[in-house]
Image (cartoon, helix red, strand yellow):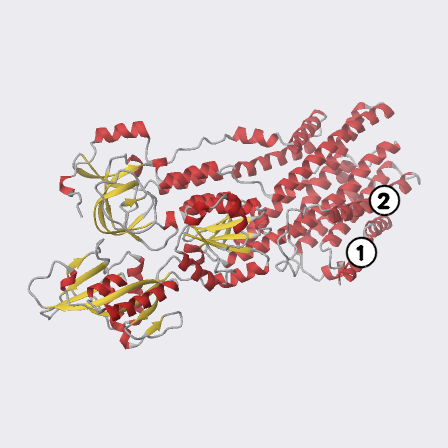
Amino acid sequence: MEKWDISSVKGLSQVEAERRLNEEGYNELPSKKNKSTLTIAFEVLKEPMFLLLVACGVIYLIFGDIQEALMLLLSVFVIIGITFYQEKKTERALEALRDLSSPRAFVIRGGEQKRIAGREVARGDVLILSEGDRVPADAVLRSSTNFSCDESLLTGESVPVRKINSLTSSEMGKPGGDDLPFVYSGSLVVNGQGIAEVLGTGINTELGKIGKALQIEESDQTRLQKETRKLVKNFSIAGLFLCIAIISIYAVTRGDLLGGFLAGLTFAMSILPEEFPVVLTVFLALGAWRISQNRVLTRQIPAVETLGSATVLCVDKTGTLTLNKMTVARIFTKDKEHVIDGKTATIPDEFYEVIEYSILSSQKEPFDPMEKAFKEVGEKYLKNFSNDSPLIQQYPLSEKLLAMTHVFRPNGRKDYLVAAKGAPEAIVDLCHLDKKEKERILAQVSKIANDGLRVLGVAKSTFSGSKLPEDQHDFDFKFLGLIGLMDPVRDSVPSAVKEAYGAGIRVIMITGDYPNTAQNIARQIGLKNPDERITGEELDRISDEELKERIKIVNIFSRVVPEQKLRIVNALKSNGEVVAMTGDGVNDAPALKTANIGIAMGGRGTDVAREASDIVLLDDDFLSIVQVVRVGRRIYDNLKKAMAYILAVHVPIAGMSLIPVILKTPLVLLPMHIVFLELVIDPACSLVFEAEKEETDIMERPPRTSEDSLFSRKTATISFFQGFSVLAVVLAVFLMSYYGGDSETHSRALTYTTLIFANLGLIFMNRSWSRTIFRSLELPNRTLWYVTGGALFFLSIILYLPFGRDLFKFSPLSLTDVLLCMGAGFLSILWFEVWKVFHQRHLH
């Protein structure tokens, strides 16, 4: 095959290269214009809840209530900070792509060989590529020797692909498959040397197209975020109108506009759900911290909860289900077979030659993963083997003969030792076997390949002539046997898939590998319906509607490219599925970003995949995904309890802010009381629910559906019943005290103390909606006792220290008063314990 002679190649001149860079741009992905801090802050402040918070804070500042104003305004800045961090996701993904796509480059310019920054490579540049180089741009090979590339970042195929030369190609083709002349930006040269002419740079490369897809794809809000946002909006609107109504009523009936503003804002504070986003943030942040103990990094905190509701897990085979590392699985001689697995201690003597000559026909310090596998098996099982003979000549792979031959002259010997390995068909051809023997060997090869293994043949020869032949066919080869290699499944994967099925999560394999290999891996890991599959070629032929139907039963997608992975994820989402996607290569990044939850492998994964994902498994342990699902479901369960508690406790707080206005009695709750209850006690109590252990059946339930609301009719009904029962008791305490002749400060102290004890009662009884309070107390929860102790300590300060009493406008209470308040508070919620008992009996 004709090829360029490196000595005569001039390449671009420096002037021409600079001109093209100025006209066409540098060899990097374009930067996206980032939002400024002020822009992000403005977007956050447009939300109804934050507008109300800021308005209340400003009004409090006008009236001199600085503490309340600062607490409200501080919560705004906290949420702005969180939002600012999350807005950087796409920017970081693109920056990682730019880093990967711009390695150093060795080029010929003006007849001189020089090393330049990858971003300075221009279209038309001539690249000099060697083993171990990262290709800096899309190019076509004009000259090469034994050249192969690892394109798994783009195709998902772990086996390197063989390359050929072309003097005529002027347009890039798609990646994937052997004997193509094209090399791609971001791929890795694993064998040989070559000279290539650059045809595409920057966004015009295959890698650049993936970066463009990352810019286009938008991440969805999680279901919980949408639900909380809707809840906050409804409460805010209701609070605003009622606040205006209370101000008007108070001013008209009492002739006191200033008092009306205080009463109205107090009520708005009591009904305004500023705790909801705080509690949501606390739960998800602590959940992320908990899973980090299992070496799982959460990049998008809401994804922890979303993964608990995942219905489909899309899995990339290479490096996710498998180790992305070739290993020798089987060795074959003429009539025998030996299987090598983790339990193999030794191998029979008759298989030694096959291993020895596979090593001799490889590089001494191999870069190719298959040659590495030969070396590793040799080091493990061949104790007395050494490869120290000088290499005299190498016959490289060629398009005509897919075999490689090494010729040695061992010390002290006159004849040459010849070792060959390659495609079984090529080795059989070199050995000049008869037709019957050829058919037998090739039938065996077909059977091995159907088991998902990569098969190579091995042969040996000797040569005693003075001049080595020009062609490998001139050696008298003897066929030694076959070697079957595999990219092994991770040990933890089968059990992880089984647990996923137990949790009602469907598992789908999406890979760029061959169909037979994908189906073999599917059977190894226990994937359901392994006989059904769709290839990338079929995907191109079928419509979106047909895909939506077929994807309901097909769990294996093979020979797919990144754009098709996106299409698969989108088809699942259009069917109402909550999709989690795992992956580790650049080819996975758009699908990771589009999926509801993107899960990247951290150990072997690329920066691009990690930056585009929501969750990163730092140790690449697939089993960790199941643990994250467990944490996600626990978070949702406990979050539901916490939100129900907050809704319940808002009822008596709002009621005791509104009823005194209607009854024309002194205000019971003042802004200081409301601020403390809602911004200190409520979030602190949410920690109690976050620390609760998961229910025993949490991984035996199906994923929750879109109809499963955080505030279902049942949850809201029970919460309101709890709240109104507490309100009835607290109101009774206030009315009996006030109309019984007690002072305003004494009545307020009795009412507030009863509300604190009722609050604690709600916490204890809402820890579980299935276990009674006595069974719940058997389960450890140190946070519960810290919160209880803190609340009682605070209560004692505001009741018995002059500073506290003056701040809260209380009178001191006797021990009898406190015990009566405690009894009334717990009595207000006792009916819920009775309901639990009857409800459990009904279920069983």
Residue 120, image x, y percentages: 29, 35
- Which of the pair 86/778 is nearer the observer? 86
Q: Residue at x 62, y 45 (%)?
A: 282
The label shown at residue 746 is none
Going by the numbered disc 1, the residue's amino acid type is Trp
Q: Amino acid at mark 2?
A: Ala
**Residue 810 relative to residue 105: left or right:** right
Q: Is residue 523 left or right of residue 11?
A: right
Q: Where is 384 relative to 756, above or below?
A: below
- Foreground tag (2 vs 1): 1
In the rendered image, is residue 378 in sight? no
Residue 712, given in percent of the width and then of the height, sits at 71, 47
Q: Quadrant of the C terminus?
A: bottom right
What's the mark number on residue 728? 2
Image height of 195 relative to 505, above or below: above
Circle 2: is it few (<14), some (14-19), or many (20+) Cα within 10 Å? some
Question: Does residue 151 appear in the picture of this structure?
Answer: yes
Q: Residue furthest front?
A: 435
The residue lying toward the viewer, choosing from 646 and 464, is: 464
List the residue tagged with mark 1: 835
Location of residue 6 with respect to 603 vertically, above or below: above
- Tell me where residue 112 sits by quadrant: top left
Q: Secondary structure at mark 2?
A: helix
Q: Residue at x 68, y 49 (%)?
A: 640
As rendered, which of 559 and 441 lies closer to the eye?
A: 441
Image quarter of residue 476: bottom left
